[in-house]
């Protein structure tokens, strides 16, 4: 009888050791630093910190006059080379007809083919330049890559933006509708958990159903031993702040 009671107590102790509240800190579920792919002068900044934005929404626009001019120039080049290619094709057809009638030599036919090939290559190059200039024009407007919250604005109208090896972050966005609670676990605690398990995150007096997103594999050394970082993701409608204290109730 004593053995049964002792086994029951040990089992309850094991469950109690696993089911625990762990201190956590809120983090953004997905955070990105944005800057334009092209250089220019900032003409407009359409958002402020705390604004919610939809995927594809314009956030910032550079002065696009230069890029618009380059697109117009490239379109004109495409039109010119399109006409030259068509003319070269007509000349080649006439040359081919004369050659078939043995009126001209093979060398003249080869020259006609060469002129047509050169005109076609110039047209392909002009079309490629037009696509590149159109892309630069599109990229002169910075858009939201996903539904997000603006968490930092580091730019003002009139500011010069130069694209380099280390792009300057102008806006920082965080994924809207989802947060992450980051916490640390002992080796025993993390060994009993699996990614995808349900947990509860408490922020203030509000409980949020959450899911274990990541369980760390590398130990973090501390004074009392080692721990492992873990993240629990949860949906949220209201705006919470990164760095806010929270609690995670383990299963």
Image (cartoon, rainbow, N blue to C red):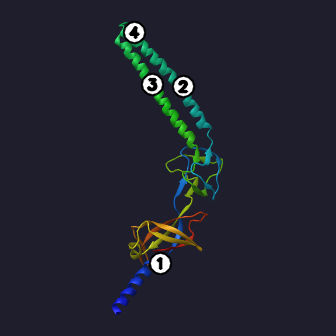
What residue would you read off at disc 1?
20
Kind of element beneath mark 1: loop
In contact (CB < 8 Å): disc 1 and disc 2: no
Mark 3 Cα shell of 10 Å, populated few (<14), some (14-19), many (≥20): some
Q: Which image quarter: residue 43? A: top right
What residue appears at the point 50 percent right and 20 percent down from the top-left corner? 84
Kind of element beneath mark 4: helix
What residue would you read off at disc 3?
120
Position in image of residue 30 (x %, y %): 51, 59
Q: Which mark is nearer the camera, 1 or 2?
A: 1
Q: Earlier in the sequence, mark 1 or mark 2?
A: 1
Position in image of residue 135 (x %, y %): 53, 39
Mark 4 Cα shell of 10 Å, populated few (<14), some (14-19), many (≥20): some
The quadrant in which the N terminus is found is: bottom left
What residue would you read off at disc 4?
98
Real-space CA distance between mark 4 and mark 3, rounded to the nearest whole angstrom = 22 Å
Kind of element beneath mark 3: helix
In contact (CB < 8 Å): disc 4 and disc 2: no
């Amino acid at each position: 009888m004593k053995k049964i009671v002792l086994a029951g107590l040990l089992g309850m102790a094991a469950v109690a050791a696993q089911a625990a509240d762990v201190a956590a800190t809120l983090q953004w579920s997905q955070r990105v630093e944005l800057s334009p792919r092209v250089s220019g002068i900032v003409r407009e900044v359409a958002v402020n910190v705390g604004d919610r934005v939809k995927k594809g929404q314009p956030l910032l626009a550079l002065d696009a006059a230069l890029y618009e001019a380059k697109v117009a120039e490239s379109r004109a080049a495409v039109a010119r080379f399109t006409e030259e290619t068509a003319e070269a094709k007509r000349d080649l057809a006439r040359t081919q007809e004369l050659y078939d009638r043995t009126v001209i030599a093979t060398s003249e036919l080869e020259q006609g083919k060469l002129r047509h090939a050169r005109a076609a290559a110039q047209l392909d190059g002009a079309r490629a330049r037009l696509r590149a200039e159109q892309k630069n024009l599109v990229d002169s407007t910075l858009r939201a890559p996903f539904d997000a919250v603006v968490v930092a604005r580091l730019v003002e109208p009139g500011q010069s933006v130069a694209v380099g090896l280390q792009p300057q972050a102008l806006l920082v966005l965080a994924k809207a509708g989802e947060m992450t609670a980051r916490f640390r676990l002992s080796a025993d605690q993390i060994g009993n958990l699996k990614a995808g398990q349900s947990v509860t995150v408490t922020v203030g007096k509000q409980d949020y159903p959450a899911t274990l997103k990541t369980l760390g594999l590398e130990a973090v050394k501390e004074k009392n031993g080692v721990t492992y970082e873990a993240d629990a993701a949860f949906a949220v409608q209201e705006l919470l702040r990164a760095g806010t204290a929270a609690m995670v109730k383990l299963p």
